Image (cartoon, rainbow, N blue to C red):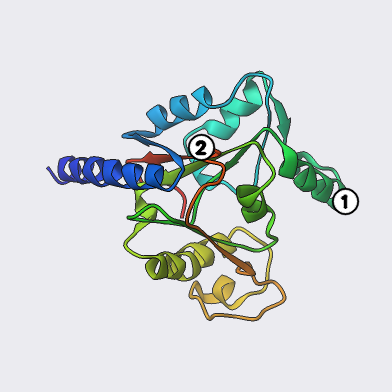
Amino acid sequence: MVKDVRVVRNQKAGEKVRENLEKRGFAAYYCATAEEALQQALALIPEGSTVSWGGCTSAEEIGLLAAVKQGNYHVLDRNQASTPEERVAIMKQALTCDVYLTGTNAITEDGELVNVDGNGNRVAAMIYGPDSVIVIAGMNKLTRTVMDAANRARTEAAPVNAQRFDIKTPCKVDGICHDCNSPDCICNQIVRTRRCKPAGRIKVILVGETLGF
């Protein structure tokens, strides 16, 4: 019963957020499951496209990164670099790819995206460059206001994300945001995307499951 009511709530809220995203110029979709989201995302990526991504746990969790690597696409994967210099070069190439895959740290009920970034490559690609951006967002990313979204990104997503890296930040040590000014800080850019221009460039796929962090 608990699972059923969560499904119903996610469906209702997801449809409302989808409508609000479309009012802001985003292309938006609601998928009840990760499998549906995977199929929807693949339908938005033309074969032969150059595809890349930044840190994108949500896309990885629905199987999108694996599907792209196995499909008929030209993939720019920074994790395949053999040197730090090559890694940076791939990240720069990704800024002009055909399709860029990403998640979002938070999304408001009225259809705005909020993201924090360490290097800035992910939010840079969302803002400008790639012809198409596909955002995978679990319904756990939903917040009421922009302030709530920024708070979620800093105090919930970032301390979890920090555990993935070999860095020295207070949140890596104790899992709690300290609003730090550490040289290793991963919250250097905070970007609010309140509209999509040109319309339809950013495609948001809302998923009725918990994805990413």
Residue 32 x, y percent position in the rendering: 31, 34
Q: Nearer the viewer, residue 211 or 37?
A: 37
93 lies left or right of 133:
right
Mark 2 surroundings: few (<14), some (14-19) or many (≥20) residues within 10 A = some
Quarter of the view holding residue 146 = bottom left
Q: Nearer the viewer, residue 132 or 24?
A: 24
The residue pinned by badge 1 equals 85
Residue 165 x, y percent position in the rendering: 65, 60
Residue 46 x, y percent position in the rendering: 60, 21
- The number of discs equals 2
Q: Earlier in the sequence, mark 1 or mark 2?
A: 1
The residue pinned by badge 2 equals 200
Q: Is residue 204 above or below residue 73?
A: below
Q: Which mark is residue 170?
A: none
Q: Residue at x 57, y 75 (%)?
A: 173
Q: Is residue 43 above or below residue 3?
A: above
Residue kind at label 2, given as amino acid type: Gly
Secondary structure of the residue carrying numbered label 1:
helix
50 lies left or right of 163:
right
Q: Single out the mark in the foreground, 1 or 2.
A: 2
2 lies left or right of 39:
left
Q: Residue at x 72, y 76 (%)?
A: 183
Q: Residue at x 63, y 22 (%)?
A: 70
Residue 92 x, y percent position in the rendering: 78, 47
